[in-house]
Amino acid sequence: MRRLRRIKILATLGPASSDLAMIRRLFEAGADLFRINMSHTPHDKMRELVATIRNVESSYGRPIGILVDLQGPKLRLGSFAEGSVQLQNGQTFTLDSDKAPGDTTRVHLPHPEILAALRPGHALLLDDGKVRLIAEETSKEHAVTRVVVGGKMSDRKGVSLPDTDLPVSAMTSKDRADLEAALVTGIDWIALSFVQRADDVIEAKKMIRGRAAVMAKIEKPQAIDRLADIIEASDALMVARGDLGVELPLERVPSLQKQMTRMARRAGKPVVIATQMLESMIQSPVPTRAEVSDVATAVYEGADAIMLSAESAAGKFPVEAVSTMNRIGEEVERDPIYRSVLTAQRPAPESTAGDAIADAARQIAETLDLPALICWTSSGSTAVRVARERPKPPIVAITPNITAGRRLAVVWGVHCVVAEDARDQDDMVGRAGQIAFRDGFVRAGQRVIIVAGVPLGIPGTTNMVRIASVGPEGDAIM
């Protein structure tokens, strides 16, 4: 199951893709890891999906990552006496703490934290931005607003606050229960929704205690202002363009996507581009040309992974959506311009032994035109460091740790193999050649470069580079 592309594909599971046969087909079509959205998935179904993915994983012998996406705080209006109202431009509309059903003049807002934090001039976006209000008078009991963009408003519609920094955690009681249930199953990644600050990530990590890696979803304007701190606290980043495009002007989203991709790469953290990438394929077997261009742009930018949401979870053509994404990735990466773009964006190595080794290994591999760059890694950190360099040859990561292998499923260019740890350096070099030979990365007589940390088995000690020739039986000889 060697992929012919470097970028990874993250496919969301749902009603259209929850049985063994379909998950197997999605993996064969190109999905490298799977997302379980806890906004729509009860615990029993989540456990069933995890077991099914592990079944597919064992049958193919290749690590498959599982990401559980927490719902996060959902801010919603109360209900209306008649089910809905029509708000007119320029009218006054009040949000208050009164639980009585609403009308054309007011409605209950069951979130005292919003009323406490709102200030005059702050915007409120209702129903994914379809209706826009501006706060004029605020108190802890009510907020008097002016309707700037009117429209129909019905029960329990969502509220977004692009100008308001809410003093609330990114995790609700539901998220905590979902998180504990997911960690028991042994999932690999947790996606944290509506992150506003680095403390949100730190809070989640205290609960997780190393049992999964944390991916911060960037979908709030407040997170943009604190992006460097959030990236530092996180293990990976997701550019969640859907909610980001509700709370910010749409025209800002493409430039922010580029900025976040480059910042994450400089920090050596995987970055996933998400939302509406092939949206039309929910109903159509082929995407629009604009969607193909959008996916291709993410590939050219050097993102680690691209994500399908409803396309694979609830659409009519989940396998076709994954297959289309796979073909786009392969085609872009064949383009000579692709390498020049990645090279132009390459960050300077940090002044650490690991980064210096990774940068040197990439230069050697490209200078000698080697067919593979092989990493022995216990925690996965060596492979992540090498992937940050976006080397021309494929990265083969060998690890004795299945957990590390599954987490590497989201990392650019990494083909991961779980194998028994090396006994010594000779065994490490010899088996590196055998594994790369077996999986079709090298032929007898070719040379490979091997990166590792010694002493073996100690995480975070990337300090060794070897060039070795591959013998007729596939074993490498220094």
Image (tube, helix red, strand yellow):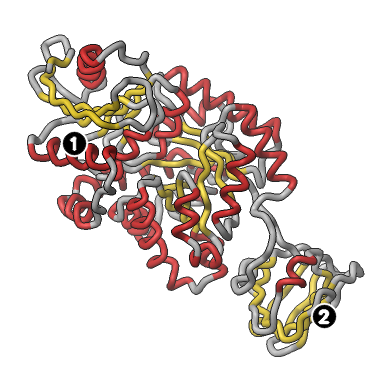
> Does residue 18 show up?
yes
Which amino acid lies under the numbered mark 2 shown in the image of this protein?
Thr
Image quadrant containing the N terminus: top left
Residue 317 in the image: state x and y as whole percent. Answer: 48, 43
Residue 347 in the image: state x and y as whole percent. Answer: 26, 53
Q: Secondary structure at mark 2?
A: loop
Looking at the image, residue 408 sits to the left or right of residue 203; the answer is left
Residue 189 to residue 249: above or below = above
Q: Residues within 10 Å of mark 2 (few under 14, many from 20)?
A: some
User: Quadrant location of residue 36?
Assistant: top right
Looking at the image, residue 403 sits to the left or right of residue 326; the answer is right
Which amino acid lies under the numbered mark 1 shown in the image of this protein?
Ala
Q: Secondary structure at mark 1?
A: helix
Closer-to-camera residue (233/374): 233
Closer-to-camera residue (338/352): 352
Looking at the image, residue 4 sits to the left or right of residue 90; the answer is left
Residue 473 in the image: state x and y as whole percent. Answer: 16, 9
Q: Name the residue carrying label 1.
A: 361
Which residue lies at the image location 22% right of the left edge and 37% below the top edge?
357
Which residue lies at the image location 70% right of the left edge and 30% below the top edge?
44
Looking at the image, residue 150 sits to the left or right of residue 108; the answer is left
Which residue lies at the image location 68% right of the left edge and 87% below the top edge?
89
Residue 173 to residue 156: above or below = above
User: Quadrant location of residue 413?
Assistant: top left
Image quadrant containing the C terminus: top left
User: Quadrant location of residue 82?
Assistant: bottom right
Q: Residues within 10 Å of mark 1 (few under 14, many from 20)?
A: many
Which residue lies at the image location 89% right of the left edge and 71% below the top edge?
98
Q: Name the residue carrying label 2.
A: 104
Which is in the foreground here, disc 2 or disc 1?
1
